[in-house]
Amino acid sequence: MDTFSLSILAPERRLLQNERATSLVVTTVDGEIEILPGHANLVGILAPGRFVYQAEGQKAVTGVISSGFVNVEEESVKVVAETIELAQEIDVNRAKAAQKKAEEMLTAAGMDEQTFRKYQLKVQRAIIRQQIGGVSI
């Protein structure tokens, strides 16, 4: 089975570093993409969303990435993210509370466009975390 070297990194953790993988799905600003061995070189901007990777001979691993970038070069894939959270690490109740708080902030009057967008992204991340955290893989 063909593989590629996969690294998934964030400032607070190194989830994987140069592990052999058979597939990776990440959410980019243009939608979800799947990377398989032999994928064309690319650099993509990550959007808040799920990621799923399959390490060689292991069960698929699912989680959430907040933002960052993916770099595919030759047979090496690097994901550098602001935050990484595995599905089993997600506290769904905390994500629900974060969503509620962000939605309340969105109803506040007099908010500038940048602050409004910040709370929109918080709602989006909280919803994604709930979706992924509620899935048992």
Image (tube, helix red, strand yellow):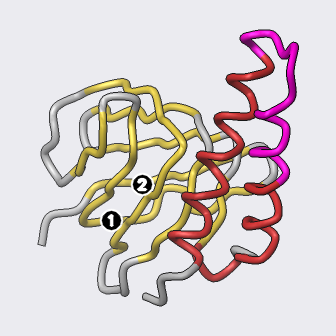
- At a point 33% along the width and 72% down the height, the residue shown is 54
**Of residues 129 and 67, the one drawn nearer to the viewer in this rendering:** 129
Q: Earlier in the sequence, mark 2 or mark 1?
A: 2
Give the residue type at disc 1.
Answer: Ala
Q: Is residue 110 magenta?
A: yes
- At a point 45% along the width and 75% down the height, the residue shown is 61
SS at circle 1: strand
Location of residue 105 (image quadrant):
top right
- Quadrant position of the C terminus in the picture: bottom left
SS at circle 2: strand
106 relative position to 29: left or right = right
Q: Which residues are magenta?
A: 101-114
Residue 6 numbered mark, or none: 2
Q: Looking at the image, is 74 positioned above or below residue 128? A: above
Location of residue 129 (image quadrant):
bottom right
- At a point 50% along the width and 31% down the height, the residue shown is 69
How far apart are the two marked residues, 2 and 1, measured between alpha carbons? 6 Å
Q: Is residue 12 magenta?
A: no
- Quadrant position of the N terminus in the picture: bottom left
- At a point 72% along the width and 11% down the height, the residue shown is 113
